Amino acid sequence: MNVETGAPLVLQSLENGILTLTMNRPKQRNALSRPLMAAMQAALDDAHETETVKVIVIAGEGPGFCAGHDLKEVQSNASHEFRQELLKDCSTLMQRIHSVRQPVIARVHGIATAAGCQLVATCDLAVAAPEAQFATPGVNIGLFCNTPMVGISRAVARKQMMRMLLTGDMVDAEKALQIGIISDISEAGQLDDMVYAQARQIASKSSMTLAIGKEAFYRQVEMPLADAYDYASEVMAYNMGKKDAYEGIDAFINKREPKWTGE
């Protein structure tokens, strides 16, 4: 609960299989306090178990998408144990985005810095408004963005990542697209149109197929090449035996729309 407003820290809206989770600390630019991360974690856990949820969109209320960790919270809790738990919470949340069975799309309308930039890079897809900006600015305050770099460096080439980390400079949406932080830039004023068009398109696919494919992608990408092929071949053979695969192939051959069962 947002102690200032009494509103939930994460607003939830489910429509046509698309669950929107909106971080709701607008005055703090949705800084990732421990309570906010706990609320996000709980929402993702629930979504993972909810068959009617096909796609998840992560958004931010107010002028910024996410300004990273809440520095006031960090400053007011000086113990090493608190810092360890804070960073563990964040790491667990980022990994949950990968392990949740649904595809996750970041809707980025404003700044996304430090752990907020990590959040964007961690999502399966990220659509940004033209005015969105990204940075890992910890170096400017004597705090290298060590944990944010874990998620971002898995999307961004090493020298581009190091440039962001060493300078702390803001990166605009065009550059973020070029180096891989985001997957798309919307036209001005068309962010929701692009985000939800993609979400609807993905939600129209077999939920079973999406879940198998998402898990396989993140597992194989960290493997040596031969191991990745062996693993992906096993997953593909398993996928081929599922009911939705038979349905999809038959629908394709007979030129009709498939009727997915999620099995």
Image (cartoon, rainbow, N blue to C red):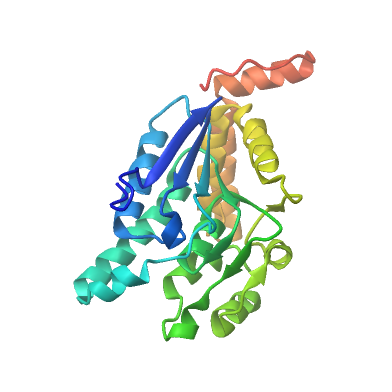
In the image, taking residue 217 as reference, residue 4 lies left or right, namely left
Q: Is residue 19 visible?
A: yes
Extreme residue toward the front, this view: 5
Residue appearing at x 62%, y 62% in the figure: 181
Give the quarter of the image for residue 221.
Answer: bottom right
Residue appearing at x 51%, y 36% in the figure: 211
Q: Is residue 30 visible?
A: no
Depth check: give the residue in front, 101 or 188: 188
Provide residue 35's location: percent of width, then percent of height. Answer: 29, 54
Residue appearing at x 49%, y 58% in the figure: 119
Task: Give the vertical position of 207 relative to 177 (above or below).
Answer: above
Provide residue 82's location: percent of width, then percent of height. Answer: 22, 69
Provide residue 100's location: percent of width, then percent of height. Answer: 44, 42
Depth check: give the residue in front, 86 or 112: 112
Provide residue 152's location: percent of width, then percent of height. Answer: 54, 66
Residue appearing at x 43%, y 37% in the figure: 12
Q: How many marks?
A: 0
Depth check: give the residue in front, 257 or 234: 257
Task: Give the vertical position of 18 relative to 151 (above or below).
Answer: above
Task: Give the vertical position of 5 relative to 16 (above or below).
Answer: below
Give the quarter of the image for residue 177.
Answer: bottom right
